[in-house]
């Protein structure tokens, strides 16, 4: 089963896909992207991801010369060609290829779609939970746009790796936390599942919304409000959500344990229900 690329509607092996060195995604990070997960060959929450892609495109004023049905057709063909039961589907749209100049060129945007195999986090990792570190939030002011400008996220993830942690959480000077470098943040305290409210500093995670709905369906109270490092120190549970990580419990924050240092019952319950039909034990 091959890794597949679809570049501007042309399909081929991922290893053979080529983009111009004058593409504005390469020169400026001038573009947006989405990451979509499949289970059993079917895209999970596809419409929600494509809705967010359209919002990102509108925010940065990129106007693809294809319609949503075209993109959906490419996605279906790419997934069928790859044949992976569980796959990571990556969609990137840049402003296109043009000589280097900051002003918008009048050129067709570049659309790249790739399909690669993916596996869920090992059960042992789910059972043990993960450590995170906090890092200063150096990102631009529109983190709600899923843009290609990820250098602060790259540096944050490297800092986490060097600290032996799974993820980095972006923190403001007052200790208010936004989200992870590649995930949304949740805390559970006194039976309430809380996550930072949406805004310019928070990406509207598709998995975030799904987890909130799962919690409400389970009869749990939810809140969208600021979370601080102090909140995590007092929390009964902390967990992360994301397309590729699903739900994973956090057991240490900056070398301080969360509660008893194990994923809690709410985290385990939500992880077991993500996605539906998985049938994992809670």
Image (tube, rainbow, N blue to C red):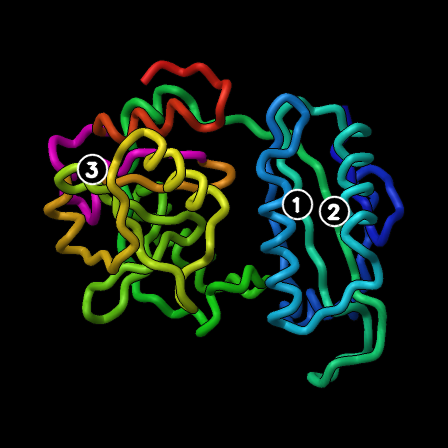
For the residues carrying marks 3 and 1, which lies nearer the camera in this image?
3
Q: How far apart, in angstroms, are the residues tagged by discs 3 and 1? A: 31 Å
Specify start and end residues of the magenta stretch as a single range: 246-263
Q: Is residue 167 above or below residue 139?
A: above
Residue farthest along the right direction in this orientation: 10
In this rendering, would 221 be left or right of 180?
left
x and y, in percent, of residue 108 in the image: 84, 68
Q: Which label sits on residue 113?
A: 2
Query: Which secondary structure lies at badge 3?
Result: strand
Q: Is residue 257 visible?
A: no
Q: How far apart, in angstroms, are the residues tagged by discs 2 and 1? A: 6 Å
- Residue at the location (29% across, 45% down)? 186
In the picture of the structure, the residue carrying the numbered disc 1 is 90
Q: Are marks 2 and 1 in contact (CB under 8 Å)?
A: yes
- Mark 2 or 3, nearer chain start: 2
For the residues carrying marks 2 and 3, which lies nearer the camera in this image?
3
Q: Is residue 156 above or below residue 43?
A: below
x and y, in percent, of residue 127 in the image: 30, 22
In this rendering, would 163 be left or right of 93?
left
x and y, in percent, of residue 229 in the image: 18, 56
In the picture of the structure, the residue carrying the numbered disc 3 is 237
- Residue at the location (50% across, 46% down)? 206
- Within 10 Å of disc 3 (Cα), the crowding (few <14, some 14-19, many 20+) is many
């Amino acid at each position: 089963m091959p890794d597949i690329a679809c570049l501007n509607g042309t399909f081929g092996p991922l290893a053979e896909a080529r983009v111009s060195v004058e593409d504005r995604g390469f020169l400026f990070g001038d573009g947006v992207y989405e990451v979509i997960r499949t289970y059993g060959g079917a895209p999970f929450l596809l419409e929600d991801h494509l809705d967010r892609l359209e919002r990102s495109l509108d925010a940065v004023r990129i106007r693809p010369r294809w319609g949503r049905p075209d993109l959906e057709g490419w996605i279906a063909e790419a997934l069928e060609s790859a044949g992976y039961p569980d796959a990571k589907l990556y969609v990137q749209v840049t402003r296109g290829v043009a000589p280097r100049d900051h002003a918008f060129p009048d050129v067709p945007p570049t659309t790249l779609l790739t399909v690669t195999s993916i596996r869920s986090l090992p059960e042992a990792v789910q059972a043990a939970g993960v450590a995170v570190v906090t890092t200063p939030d150096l990102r631009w002011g529109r983190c709600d746009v899923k843009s290609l400008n990820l250098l602060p996220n790259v540096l944050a993830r490297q800092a986490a790796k060097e600290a032996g942690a799974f993820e980095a959480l972006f923190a403001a000077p007052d200790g208010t936390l936004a989200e992870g470098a590649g995930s949304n943040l949740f805390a559970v305290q006194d039976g309430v599942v809380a996550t930072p409210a949406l805004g310019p500093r928070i990406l509207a995670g598709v998995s975030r919304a799904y987890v909130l709905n799962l919690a409400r369906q389970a009869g749990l109270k939810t809140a969208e409000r600021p979370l601080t490092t102090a909140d995590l120190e007092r929390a009964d549970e902390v967990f992360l959500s994301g397309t590729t990580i699903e739900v994973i419990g956090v057991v240490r924050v900056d070398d301080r344990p969360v509660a008893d240092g194990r994923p809690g019952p709410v985290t385990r319950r939500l992880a077991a229900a993500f996605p539906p039909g998985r049938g994992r034990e809670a």
